[in-house]
Amino acid sequence: MIEPAESSDVPAPPAAPGPKASRYARPLELLTIAAVIGADQLTKALVRRTLDLNDHVPVIPGFLDITHVQNTGAAFGLLNAADFPFKALLMIGIAGIALVAIAAYATQLGFHERLARFGLSLILGGAFGNLIDRAFAGHVVDFVDVYWGSAHFWAFNVADAAITIGAILVLLDMIGLGRQHASHSV
């Protein structure tokens, strides 16, 4: 008969790193952030270089134009018409605080929350892209002009689109869509 080995005779196998081992950004998330910033800054540079302020080029007549506008306010043109001392610094400060809060939240997500992590990567990339504009130019370049007749949606850019898509993905994750559920054995 074979006797069981003493627990001290057999070394324990090394613990495998679990999903919580690395709570910070993974390469795909960093690549997503960099890609959004790069695409955003490239498209804005092209618009600045090819279109004068308030000029437009029809893409789909009656629906979509590329229009060079400057947004000194917040999202959706909020505070764009307002003029007060230190407005640019206030907008940069608010954006900076939002970035820190979003990044802190992202570090709390588990590895299995991939949809939320990807969504937050899009949000961070977009927020950084717009913050770069605010810090260096005092305004954000917007250029995608969607309209129907005389009704215009707010002009936006690649960063704004990434932020919007990212927010939708985070919301979908919060309501449970996109999560893989492990089967529970009885």
Image (tube, helix red, strand yellow):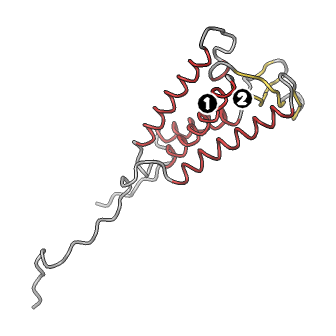
Depicted 100 relative to depicted 28: above or below: above
Amino acid at pointer 1 = Leu
Depicted 180 relative to depicted 94: above or below: below
Q: Residues within 10 Å of mark 1 (few under 14, many from 20)?
A: many
Report x, y in % for residue 39: 70, 43
Judged from the image, the secondary structure of the residue bearing numbered disc 2 is loop
Q: How many marks?
A: 2
Measured Cα–Cα span from mark 1 to mark 2? 14 Å
Report x, y in % for residue 103: 47, 38
Residue 64 in view, yes or no = no
| Residue 121 in the figure: left or right of residue 137 | left
Q: Nearer the viewer, residue 152 or 45?
A: 45
Q: Nearer the viewer, mark 1 or mark 2?
A: 1
Judged from the image, the secondary structure of the residue bearing numbered disc 1 is helix
Instruction: Return the residue found at the far bottom.
Output: 1
Q: Residues within 10 Å of mark 2 (few under 14, many from 20)?
A: many
Residue occupying the point 73% across, 28% down: 141
User: What residue would you read off at disc 1?
Assistant: 131
Looking at the image, do the residues carrying marks 1 and 2 touch, with CB atoms under 8 Å apart?
Answer: no
Name the image quarter holding residue 75: top right
Residue 53 in view, yes or no = yes
Amino acid at pointer 2 = Phe
The disc, 1 or 2, on the residue closer to the chain's N-terminal end is 1
Residue occupying the point 65% across, 47% down: 35
User: What residue would you read off at disc 2?
Assistant: 156
Report x, y in % for residue 183: 38, 58
Name the image quarter holding residue 19: bottom left
Q: Nearer the viewer, residue 58 or 79?
A: 79
Report x, y in % for residue 143: 77, 29
Residue occupying the point 61% across, 14% down: 87
Residue occupying the point 40% across, 53% down: 22
